[in-house]
Image (cartoon, helix red, strand yellow):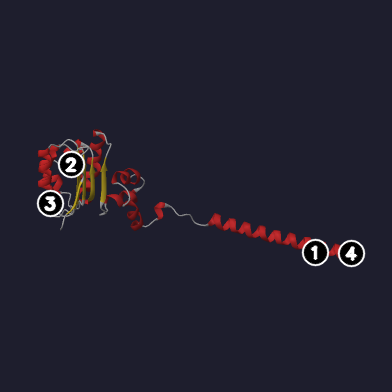
């Protein structure tokens, strides 16, 4: 009987000792986790941040990061990174600020430009000088742009990297459409164009040889 009591006592002590060890081990793990250094977005290298920027429109990048600190402001201002611009649902007063703060300073870095406002097209694309500054432009998308812009399509001929052009509008006459096609086939570096005239018109997609 005495032996049984001693065995129970030893077993209880062993169990308590194991629990203490488990508790100590868990506590140590918690300490290690709490002291592990945290990673922050601003700790990332410039190269990684630039890769992340490639997924966003320049307006989002500018409004989100340029006022955080001087480092991010310099990354945006001094970078040679190609940028994308999508002008949609922007009021005229806001666009004036957008044009002054973003488009003019960075127009030589614009890789992709999507315009859906008539007043935006009138400001950006009515001047041959403005268009000639878009030296890195590869993709141009024009949605519901006035037919008065058609005469300016000829200025695109001087853009050395323009390879993709999309025009979508239901306000062009048959004469306008013929002029669009004439201007498009004069663009020397164009590889792809997508033209949609009218709600029920056929979408014309063409791959052009270089």
Where is residue 189? Give x, y as percent: 15, 55
Where is residue 105? Give x, y as percent: 22, 46
Q: Please report contact status of discs 3 and 1: CB closer than 8 Å, yes or no.
A: no
Secondary structure at badge 3 equals: loop
Mark whose residue sits in front, 3 or 1: 3
Secondary structure at badge 4 equals: helix
Secondary structure at badge 1 equals: helix
Q: Please report contact status of discs 4 and 3: CB closer than 8 Å, yes or no.
A: no
Q: Is 134 left, or right, of 5 in this rendering?
A: left
Q: Please report contact status of discs 1 and 2: CB closer than 8 Å, yes or no.
A: no
Residue drawn at (39%, 52%), measured in percent from left and top? 42
C-alpha separation, residue under disc 2 versus residue under disc 3: 19 Å
C-alpha separation, residue under disc 1 versus residue under disc 2: 87 Å
**Residue 10 numbered mark, or none:** 1
C-alpha separation, residue under disc 4 versus residue under disc 2: 99 Å
Q: Please report contact status of discs 4 and 2: CB closer than 8 Å, yes or no.
A: no
Mark whose residue sits in front, 4 or 3: 3
Residue at which label 4 appears:
2
Residue drawn at (71%, 61%), measured in percent from left and top? 18
Residue at which label 2 appears:
124
Height in image: 15 above or below 84? Answer: below
Residue nearest the observer in this picture, 58 or 149: 149
N-term mark: 4 or 2: 4
Where is residue 67? Give x, y as percent: 34, 44
**Residue 187 numbered mark, or none:** 3
N-term mark: 4 or 3: 4
C-alpha separation, residue under disc 4 versus residue under disc 1: 12 Å
Q: Quadrant of the C terminus?
A: bottom left
């Amino acid at each position: 009987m005495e032996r049984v009591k001693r065995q129970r006592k030893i077993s209880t002590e062993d169990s308590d000792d194991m629990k203490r060890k488990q508790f100590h081990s868990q506590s140590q793990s918690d300490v290690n986790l709490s002291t592990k250094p945290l990673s922050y977005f601003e700790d990332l290298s410039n190269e990684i941040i630039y890769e992340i920027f490639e997924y966003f429109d320049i307006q989002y990048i500018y409004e989100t990061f340029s006022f955080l600190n001087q480092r991010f402001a310099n990354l945006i201002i001094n970078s040679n990174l190609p940028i994308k611009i999508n002008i949609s649902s922007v009021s005229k007063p806001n666009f004036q600020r957008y044009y002054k703060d973003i488009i003019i300073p960075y127009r030589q870095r614009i890789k992709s430009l999507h315009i859906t406002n008539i007043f935006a097209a009138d400001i950006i694309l009515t001047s041959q000088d403005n268009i000639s500054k878009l030296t890195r432009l590869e993709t141009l998308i024009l949605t519901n742009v006035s037919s008065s812009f058609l005469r300016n399509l000829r200025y695109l001929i001087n853009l050395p990297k323009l390879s993709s052009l999309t025009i979508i509008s239901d306000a062009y006459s048959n004469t306008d459409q013929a002029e669009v096609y004439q201007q498009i086939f004069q663009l020397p570096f164009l590889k792809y164009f997508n033209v949609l005239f009218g709600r029920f018109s056929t979408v014309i997609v063409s791959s052009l040889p270089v």
